[in-house]
Amino acid sequence: MALGVGIVMIAQLEMGNSWRVLIPDETPSLITGGLFRYSRNPIFLGMMLMALGIALAVPHTLSWMAFAVAYVTISVQIRLEEDYLGRTLGETYKTYREQIRRWF
């Protein structure tokens, strides 16, 4: 869980003013340094690690179901964001997407 929290915090700091909770109306800047050199979605990766940590710490059907729901909803959000970035950033995002893995 702590590793996940750390990844989320670092990635949010690295995004600076580009960090948003929802898909923005304006054209975003593409962050490619720091943790974003290894994962296109380090914040979501950190969140998944936190959810996995909870499921491992409290091994119960509900915690594993919550982990599964988190995985599905985060995966949907990632695909929505990737579609948006592809439309707004075009070739720049396509190149980044080809070079950097979705998760790690």
Image (spheres, helix red, strand yellow):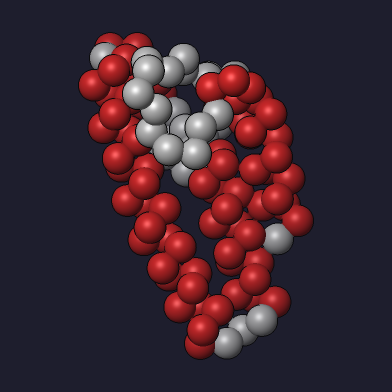
State the residue in front, 14 or 34.
Answer: 14
On the rendered structure, is 19 left or right of 94?
right
From what the image shows, is residue 91 above or below residue 59? Answer: above
Compared across the picture, whether 39 is left or right of 4 comes to left
Establish if 33 lies above or below 64: above
Q: Is residue 9 left or right of residue 66?
A: right
Identify the residue at horizontal 67%, vertical 52% (top origin): 4
* Residue positioned most to the bottom: 61
Residue 54 picture location, percent across and down:
65, 71
- Whether residue 50 is visible to the viewer of this picture, yes or no, is yes
Please state the horizontal and vertical placement of residue 71, each as a whole percent of the image: 43, 60
**The N terminus, quarter of image:** bottom right
* On screen, residue 72 above or below 94: below
Residue 5 in picture, x, y percent from top left: 70, 50
Residue drawn at the location 63% of the way across and 33% of the way down: 12
Return the residue found at the far front. Answer: 25
> Which residue is pictured at 43% across the width and 38% down the height?
22
Front residue of 27 and 3: 27
Closer to us: 74 or 27: 27
Using the image as rendered, state which of residue 22 and residue 66 is in the foreground: 22
**Residue 42 position within the rendered picture, expressed as x and y whole percent measured from the top left:** 56, 39
Instruction: Name the residue rendered at 52%, 46% in the picture.
Output: 44
